[in-house]
Image (spheres, coloured by chain):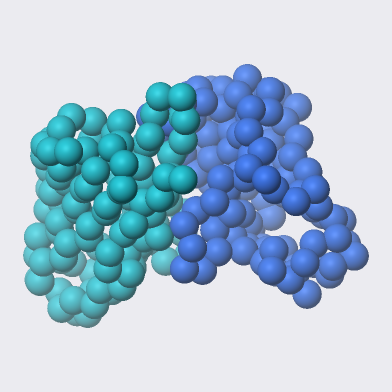
Chain colours: A blue, B cyan
Amino acid sequence: ETGVTQTPRHLVMGMTNKKSLKCEQHLGHNAMYWYKQSAKKPLELMFVYNFKEQTENNSVPSRFSPECPNSSHLFLHLHTLQPEDSALYLCASSQVRASNEKLFFGSGTQLSVL
Amino acid sequence: GQQVMQIPQYQHVQEGEDFTTYCNSSTTLSNIQWYKQRPGGHPVFLIQLVKSGEVKKQKRLTFQFGEAKKNSSLHITATQTTDVGTYFCAGDYGGATNKLIFGTGTLLAVQP
């Protein structure tokens, strides 16, 4: 148990569906991240929030919409996804947003888009 | 842009053999982190190296940071089946970029 909880663990959705991924951290951290992990590719940083403010959006398509209501919770809203969006989506947190901070990852949501 | 290359992509060893994975950056790193991801699991932080030429050990794992702070290695002595997983390095470019760039990872398989 890393202190970062993600739900659901698995998700299958059609291209016209709308779904949301949820992440909650119990570590008292102030920074939260969404990463995408695809086979044979490096972890891709999608979004970063620091003290509830979005600080980074790494050219992510608008069909992915993040939300951070407080420092402990992070959501990723999904709509009209494409099959190539199928991947493991990992949430992570760190004390603050800094590249030298170690990351604590959740177990991830394995997403399949049909 | 910054890129972190990691080799090999895959390594299959017999239990008891040693294993090494290498990480290279084209530009100088501020520091480097290593993570392990078990099959079906999530990345777990192992260690961070900061100083030029730094060597750190965790039981059978030895981590090195190059003198030029452009490369790093993870060496496992006498592998065990519990070492199975993917090992990722992540290069911190620090400064104004404030970016942590992950390598592609090395998948280690250990045959009993």
Quarter of the image where the C terminus of chain B is located:
bottom left
Q: Is residue B2 above or below residue A55?
A: below
Q: Is residue A92 above or below residue A95?
A: below
Residue at 39% from the left image edge and 29% from the top image edge: B94
Side (left or right) of B26 relative to A10: left
Residue furthest out toward the right: A16
Residue A8, x across and y down, in percent: 69, 55
The answer to which image quadrant residue A76 occupies is top right
Residue at 43% from the left image edge and 39% from the top image edge: B100
Q: Nearer the viewer, residue A72 or A66?
A: A66
Residue at 15% from the left image edge and 56% from the top image edge: B75
The answer to which image quadrant residue A100 occupies is top left
Q: Is residue A49 above or below residue B7?
A: above
Residue B10, x across and y down, in percent: 31, 73
Side (left or right) of A98 relative to B25: right
Side (left or right) of A32 relative to B8: right
Residue at 32% from the left image edge and 64% from the top image edge: B106
Q: Nearer the viewer, residue B45 or B96?
A: B96
Residue A111, x across and y down, in percent: 68, 63
Q: Is residue A50 above or below residue A73?
A: above
In this orientation, does residue A101 appear? no
In this orientation, does residue B8 appear? yes
Residue B88, x across and y down, in percent: 35, 54
